[in-house]
């Protein structure tokens, strides 16, 4: 793939994960995790989202500043920053309760979307409440990546149907490799995306590029918490795409970034972690 200008907009959600049993919390969210990792990999990122005006929102905005993200389209709204209450069981994060706070009513202005379209890649995710803007963004000529996780199988089906023809790089989570996942990836690419990617946790990842399947295993790591593995994989993968790497190398880079992520408690490395 040819080298293109490297500018990325991360459009969507932010939240804090709170572990009451451990007395710990950190700043996160799909596009936050993706944006931090992409920025650290050397591609400037603009984050487009809304935080609450509570102390968690202050911590989130401080994180954006610390990580040198462009915050010109970060809004602060009256109310609580979204909160996900978590449990950690056998090093797997378990979602317990969700308080959407200002994310429940987040909206993006015409100026926000015009700003997003000025970037060469726009990344969003199932929970970002930005899916209705994906067709317009894609029609502007830039690349779009979208994380459907495993929600496309249930509550997220409508989002999938509204967006899939307007996404270039589509990411999904499955329990395991097999005919179901492979048939689905082929179906996805037939709908429009250039590339469809499935991640399988400890079984690695799989790409269908319209011609062949490509499999990649995981990189060795000292597993501490699986939070952020998918978002970090996508950042590593899309960083490779933007730098003209072949698909196999993009997958390896995604696996490498994910391995570093799961080796620490929060969604990125301890040396510059967020709000724990």
Image (cartoon, grey):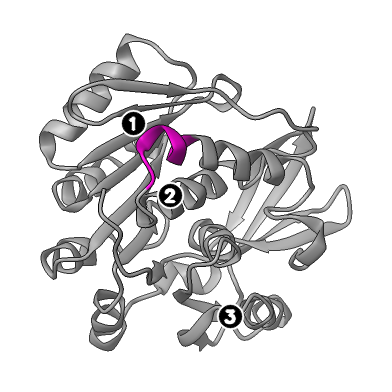
| Mark 3 surroundings: few (<14), some (14-19) or many (≥20) residues within 10 A | many
Q: Is residue 115 above or below residue 95?
A: below
Residue 63 in view of the camera: yes
Q: CA distance from mark 1 to mark 2?
A: 28 Å
Tell me the quarter of the image containing the C terminus: bottom right
* Mark 2 or 3: the one toward you: 2
- Residue located at (50% from left, 83% from top): 70
Q: Main secondary structure of the magenta part?
A: helix
Tell me where the magenta segment starts and ends, as one range.
Answer: 245-251
Which is nearer the N-term, disc 3 or disc 1? 3
> For this view, does 118 lie left or right of residue 230?
left
- Residue located at (64% from left, 79% from top): 57
> For this view, does 86 lie left or right of residue 133?
right
- Residue located at (27% from left, 57% from top): 144
Q: Position of residue 16 (x, y in %)?
A: 66, 63
* Mark 1 or 2: the one toward you: 2
> For this view, does 156 lie left or right of residue 79?
left
The residue closer to the viewer here, 180 or 37, is 37
Indicate the secondary structure of the residue bearing disc 1. Answer: helix
Q: Which label number is shown at residue 189?
A: none
Q: Which residue position is annotated with label 2?
A: 240
Q: Which residue position is annotated with label 1?
A: 153
Q: CA distance from mark 3 to mark 1?
A: 30 Å
Q: Position of residue 15 (x, y in %)?
A: 59, 64
Q: Is residue 258 above or below residue 24?
A: above
| Mark 1 surroundings: few (<14), some (14-19) or many (≥20) residues within 10 A | few
> For this view, does 10 lie left or right of residue 169?
right
Q: Is residue 120 above or below residue 147?
A: below
- Residue located at (32% from left, 78% from top): 108
Q: Which residue position is annotated with label 3?
A: 52
Indicate the secondary structure of the residue bearing disc 2. Answer: helix
């Amino acid at each position: 793939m040819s080298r293109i200008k490297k500018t990325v907009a991360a459009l969507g959600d932010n939240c804090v994960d709170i572990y009451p049993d451990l007395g710990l919390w950190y700043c996160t969210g799909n596009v936050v995790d993706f944006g931090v990792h992409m920025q650290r990999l050397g591609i400037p990122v603009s984050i487009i989202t809304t935080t609450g005006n509570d102390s968690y929102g202050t911590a989130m905005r401080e994180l954006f500043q610390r990580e040198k993200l462009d915050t010109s389209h970060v809004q602060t709204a009256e109310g609580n920053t979204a909160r996900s209450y978590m449990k950690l069981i056998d090093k797997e994060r378990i979602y317990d309760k969700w308080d959407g706070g200002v994310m429940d009513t987040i909206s993006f202005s015409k100026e926000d979307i015009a700003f997003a379209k000025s970037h060469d890649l726009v990344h969003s995710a199932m929970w970002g409440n930005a899916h209705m803007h994906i067709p317009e963004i894609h029609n502007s000529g830039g690349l779009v990546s979208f994380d459907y996780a495993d929600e496309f199988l249930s509550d997220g089906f409508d989002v999938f149907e509204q967006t899939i023809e307007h996404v270039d790089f589509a990411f999904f989570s499955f329990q395991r490799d097999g005919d179901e996942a492979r048939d689905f990836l082929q179906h996805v690419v037939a709908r429009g995306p250039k590339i469809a990617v499935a991640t399988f946790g400890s079984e690695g990842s799989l790409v269908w590029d319209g011609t062949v399947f490509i499999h990649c295993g995981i990189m060795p790591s000292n597993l501490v918490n699986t939070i952020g593995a998918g978002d970090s994989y996508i950042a590593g993968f899309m960083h490779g795409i933007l730098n003209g790497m072949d698909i196999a190398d993009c997958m390896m880079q995604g696996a490498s970034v994910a391995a570093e992520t799961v080796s620490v408690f929060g969604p990125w490395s301890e040396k510059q972690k967020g709000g724990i």
